[in-house]
């Protein structure tokens, strides 16, 4: 006679009558582990990227050794350490699992590289927007200029690995022989000068025009923004697009308009300023706009021209003319506007931080898709450091430009192990973060105006011959130490 169960179909786990399986135990440990960073950086940026928010947007549907969040933090740690190799990232994951008494993944990099490929650009875009929202809220009034948020736009280029896929998408310069150069990818960035973050970074062929790429970025402008740019961006469509978004512009006058400039025309404002009306030029086939989009542009725009003497790169005084849509003479002084244009140079320095400090000069990506994804993670890493710099500037009660990017990065790398030790205690983590900010605030960046910084290399390259043919056909000269590079 069989016994009739008292509670049929009732889960036995509710009264803890069944033993927990080993797989369930591993899953619970792994879930707890995913909530924390491999390297301790999650505690550094908990106020910017909360672990709960990251778990909410986690696209992973399986428990993998290389899930989306662990791969994100591992990749981020590679970027912080001058774009370190994937092998170093895998070793960090192995140490992480070993410390948690979990099965250690294999030491090969193939699984980790495939996991990086699985990271969707939409997942990284969500993180990028989250960081931007936090840094915008922390932007102080004194970091703005007359209540306006300063933004700068410019372009640069980076090299990729010499693969067929990269060469097809981003070919090398035509002056280089096949097999002797690297694919070059053009990048165009929109930098928020008020808090130092990259609002957007877009990629293209390096031969694309600056003004054409800039039109794609005007969607990131808002009302109350002031866009700075060199003369390559002083185009009629770009100014109209910025005004349509509610933003103002301050550009150096384009060379074609500068050559035809007649200072007697327009409304006289002062010795150095005039107000002129520009008419819409005729449509050109090379324009990035269609004829319908061009016809929708306003027929005229009113700009204010300011002409003053300024030193060029050679130290000679030359007439420099800037054009702006800020027409209020009493509120926006012409001398302040002319000096404000010099802040456009900051975007060049920020590109240098990306290339030199974060290793963006050469992207070790074998496909265009991974190259574009690397640009996304680089922008996120840079903006996270700028968020820490905002906290340091608040403690120092100093301008944001007096906080050094490299010094904050070095301290993040040095103190990350300490953050990892305290990640389980929220109170201690917050207290140590405050101490960390105070430590960073002890050192201020030395501002040295009018310092001579010529674009020249002091360290001489080795006197090796240049690779003018593919490696299989190139014949090395016997006395290479005596070889002299031709001028």
Image: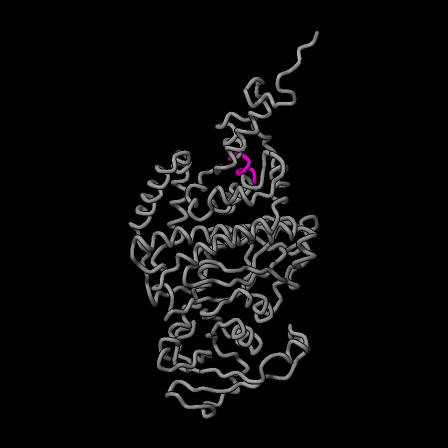
Colouring: one colour
Residue at left offset 53%, top offset 85%: 278
> Where's residue 101, x and y in %?
51, 25
Query: Hey, which residue is sitting farthest top in the picture?
Result: 1
Segment tinted magenta in the rendering:
86-92
Left or right: where does residue 3 sit relative to residue 107?
A: right
- Rendered-image quadrant of the N terminus: top right
Q: Relative to 56, is 181 above or below?
A: below
Which residue, as the protein is rendered here, is positioned at the far bottom?
264
Most foreground residue, 319 or 295: 295
Residue 372: percent from the left, percent from the top? 60, 54
Asked whether residue 147 is in view, the answer is yes
Task: Examine the image and state in which quarter residue 339 appears.
Answer: bottom left
Dominant secondary-structure state across the stretch colored magenta: helix
Front residue of this view, candidates 445 and 324 = 324
Q: Residue at x 60, y 34 (%)?
A: 63
**Residue 84, can we see it?**
no
On screen, residue 40 versus residue 187, left or right, reads: left
Measured along the vertical axis of the image, is residue 360 above or below residue 271? Answer: above
Residue 157: in magenta span: no
Is 380 placed above or below 415 here? below
Residue positioned 53% across, 64% down in the render: 220
């Amino acid at each position: 006679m069989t016994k009739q169960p008292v509670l049929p179909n009732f889960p036995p786990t509710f009264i803890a009558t069944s033993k927990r399986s080993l797989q369930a135990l591993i899953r619970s440990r792994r879930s707890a582990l995913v909530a924390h960073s491999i390297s301790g950086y999650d505690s550094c940026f908990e106020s910017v990227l909360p672990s709960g928010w990251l778990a909410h947007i986690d696209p992973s549907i399986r428990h993998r050794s290389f899930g989306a969040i662990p791969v994100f933090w591992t990749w981020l740690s590679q970027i912080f350490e001058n774009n370190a190799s994937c092998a170093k990232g895998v070793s960090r994951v192995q140490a992480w699992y070993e410390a948690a008494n979990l099965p250690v993944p294999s030491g090969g990099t193939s699984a980790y590289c495939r996991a990086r490929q699985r990271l969707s650009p939409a997942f990284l875009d969500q993180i990028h927007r989250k960081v931007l929202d936090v840094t915008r809220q922390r932007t102080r009034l004194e970091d703005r200029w007359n209540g306006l948020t300063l933004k700068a736009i410019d372009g640069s280029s980076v090299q990729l690995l010499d693969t067929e896929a990269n060469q097809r998408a981003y070919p090398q310069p035509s002056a280089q022989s096949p097999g002797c150069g690297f694919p070059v990818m053009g990048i165009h960035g929109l930098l928020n000068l008020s808090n130092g973050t990259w609002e957007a970074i877009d990629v293209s062929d390096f031969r694309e025009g600056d003004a054409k790429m800039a039109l794609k970025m005007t969607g990131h402008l808002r009302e109350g923004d002031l866009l700075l740019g060199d003369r390559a961006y002083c185009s009629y469509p770009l100014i109209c697009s910025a005004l349509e978004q509610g933003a103002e512009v301050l550009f150096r006058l384009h060379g074609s308009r500068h050559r035809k400039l007649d200072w007697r025309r327009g409304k006289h404002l002062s010795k150095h300023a005039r107000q002129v009306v520009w008419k819409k030029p005729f449509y050109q086939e090379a324009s990035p706009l269609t004829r319908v989009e061009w016809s929708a542009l306003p027929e005229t725009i009113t700009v204010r021209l300011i002409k003053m003497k300024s030193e060029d790169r050679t130290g000679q005084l030359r007439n420099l003319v800037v054009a702006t849509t800020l027409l209020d003479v009493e509120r926006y002084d012409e001398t302040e506007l002319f000096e404000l244009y010099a802040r456009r140079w900051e975007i060049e320095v920020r590109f240098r931080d990306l290339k030199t400090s974060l290793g963006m000069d050469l992207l070790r990506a074998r496909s265009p898709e991974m190259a574009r994804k690397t640009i996304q993670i680089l922008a996120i890493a840079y903006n996270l450091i700028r968020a820490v710099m905002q906290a340091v500037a608040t403690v120092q009660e100093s301008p944001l430009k007096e906080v050094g990017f490299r010094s904050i990065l070095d301290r993040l790398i040095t103190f990350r192990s300490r953050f990892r030790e305290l990640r389980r205690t929220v109170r201690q983590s917050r207290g140590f973060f405050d101490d960390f900010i105070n430590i960073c605030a002890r050192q201020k960046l030395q501002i040295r105006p009018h310092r001579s910084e010529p674009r020249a290399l002091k360290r001489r390259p080795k006197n090796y011959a240049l690779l003018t043919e593919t490696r299989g056909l190139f014949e090395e000269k016997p006395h290479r130490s005596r070889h002299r590079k031709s001028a």
